[in-house]
Image (tube, grey):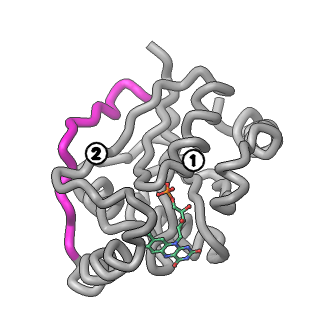
Amino acid sequence: MSKNLVLFFSVYESTKAVAEEIAAQTGADLVEIEPVTPYDSNRSHYNALARYAKKEHDEDMRPAIKNEINIENYDNIFIGYPMWWYTFPMIIYTLFDKYDFSGKTIIPFNTHMGSGDGGTYRTITQLEPNATVLNGLPVEMSEAERGCKDKVEKWLNTTIRRTAK
Ligand SMILES: Cc1cc2nc3c(=O)[nH]c(=O)nc-3n(C[C@H](O)[C@H](O)[C@H](O)COP(=O)(O)O)c2cc1C
C-alpha cells in the first residue's frame, strides 16, 4: 500500500480537482471526507450554503464525518479543503478532533477566492503539535478548475520531494 494519502473535503469540486492532481503525481491513495449531512453543491444556492457555513462557524459546530478514515498506514498525509469564512470548514476541525496525526507528516493544500490559506496552515500546527506540517499549497478556485498540473508539480518538487521522504 502507498504510504501517502490525499485526504480532502470539497463541495464544488475544485479542491477535489487539486486532490486528484496531487494523487496522480504522487501515486498517493485518495480519500474524500464525506459529511453525514451533505452540503448543497448547487452553485446557484451559494447564499444558502454561505449562511449555513457561517452558522456552523459561529456556533463552533463539529459536523460529523460519515466515512471511517484509516490514517494508520500512512506517513505523509495531504489534507485539502476550501477556504470558508476565512478559515477551514468546521468539518476539518472534526477531522483533527477525531484523528490523532502525531508522528505523521501533514501537507496541507486549499482552494480559495482571495484569502490564500487564511492562516489555516498555522492553525494545523496548533491543532496537531506532534505532527510535522510542511509548506502548503493555496490554489485560487478558477486556477484549480482550469487545471493546476504545473503548479502542483513545482510545489511537490520544491516542498515535498525534498522533505517528506
Ligand atoms: C460558505 C463559503 C464560504 C467561503 N468563504 C471564503 C473565504 O472566506 N475566503 C475565500 O477566499 N473564499 C471563500 N469561499 C470560496 C471558496 O473557498 C472557493 O469557492 C473554493 O474553491 C470552493 O472549494 P470546493 O470547490 O472544493 O468546494 C467561500 C465559499 C463558500 C461556499
Give the Cα distance between marks 2 and 1: 20 Å
Image location of residue 39, percent across then percent down: 29, 59
Q: Where 158 falls versus 126 (above or below)?
A: above
Residue 156 or residue 140, whichever sits in front: 140
The image's mark for residue 34 is 2
Answer left or right for 64 relative to 130: left
Residue range highlighted in magenta: 61-74
Q: Where 106 falls versus 56 (above or below)?
A: above
Are there few (<14), some (14-19), or many (20+) residues within 10 Å of tag 1? many
* Residue 44 found in image quarter: bottom left
Quadrant the N terminus occupies? top left
* Amino acid, disc 1: Ile
Secondary structure under the numbered disc 2 in the rendered image: loop
Image location of residue 126, percent across then percent down: 44, 68
* Amino acid, disc 2: Glu
Answer left or right for 46 relative to 122: left
30 magenta-colored: no
Q: Residue at x 59, y 67 (%)?
A: 112
Residue assigned mark 1: 107
Label 1 CB-ligand 1 distance < 8 A: no
Image location of residue 26, percent across then percent down: 64, 26
